[in-house]
Structure formats: structure tokens, C-alpha cells
Amino acid sequence: MAFWDTFLKLEYTLLEETLMQMDFGKVAAQNIPYFRMYAARVQQLLQKRYKEV
């Protein structure tokens, strides 16, 4: 499980940094919900994992 934990943490960090640096004015509004859904799903998986530990 160590690999999975590391992968999820990396994905969440990369996504968080991308969203923080993104100029949403230049991103098509139709894509923003997908970024948010993906971020929420990764966070949900991390929370589930840490509840099991």
C-alpha cells in the first residue's frame, strides 16, 4: 500500500499546485467541474485510506 499512498499524495499535490497556478480565465469553463471532481475523488480516496489505518 505504500506505493498507492505515495501515488495519491503526489497526484493530490500536483493537482492542487496546478489548480492554484491556473488562470481560470483562460481555461474553458466547461473543464473546471472535471478538475474539481478529480480533486474531490483523490481527496476522498486519501481520507478513506487514512480512516482504515
Image (cartoon, helix red, strand yellow):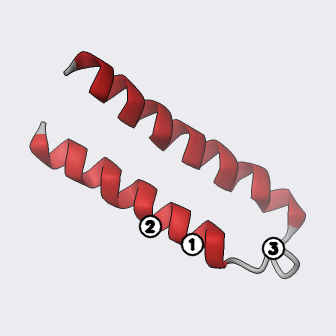
Q: Amino acid at mark 1?
A: Thr
Residue at horizontal 33%, vertical 60%? 10
Quadrant in the picture for the C terminus: top left
Query: Is there a contact, CB below 8 Å, between mark 3 and mark 2?
Result: no
Query: Is there a contact, CB below 8 Å, between mark 2 and mark 1?
Result: yes
Is 34 rendered above or below residue 29? above
Q: Which of the two labelled residues, at mark 3 and mark 2, occupies the earlier sequence position?
A: 2
Q: Position of residue 39 (x, y in %)?
A: 56, 48
Mark-to-mark CA distance, 2 and 1:
6 Å
Q: Amino acid at mark 3?
A: Phe
Residue at horizontal 53%, vertical 37%? 41
Q: Amino acid at mark 2?
A: Leu
Q: Which of the two labelled residues, at mark 1 and mark 3, occupies the earlier sequence position?
A: 1
Is 17 rendered above or below residue 15? below
Q: How many marks do you count on the picture?
A: 3
From the viewer's perspective, is 36 left or right of 23? left
From the viewer's perspective, is 35 left or right of 9? right
From the viewer's perspective, is 3 left or right of 5? left
Identify the residue under disc 1: 18
Mark 2 nearby-residue class (10 Å; few <14, some 14–19, many ≥20): few
Residue 9 disc label: none
Mark-to-mark CA distance, 3 and 2:
17 Å
Q: Secondary structure at mark 3?
A: loop
Identify the residue under disc 3: 24
Residue 14 disc label: 2
Q: Secondary structure at mark 1?
A: helix
Mark 1 nearby-residue class (10 Å; few <14, some 14–19, many ≥20): few
From the viewer's perspective, is 11 left or right of 7? right
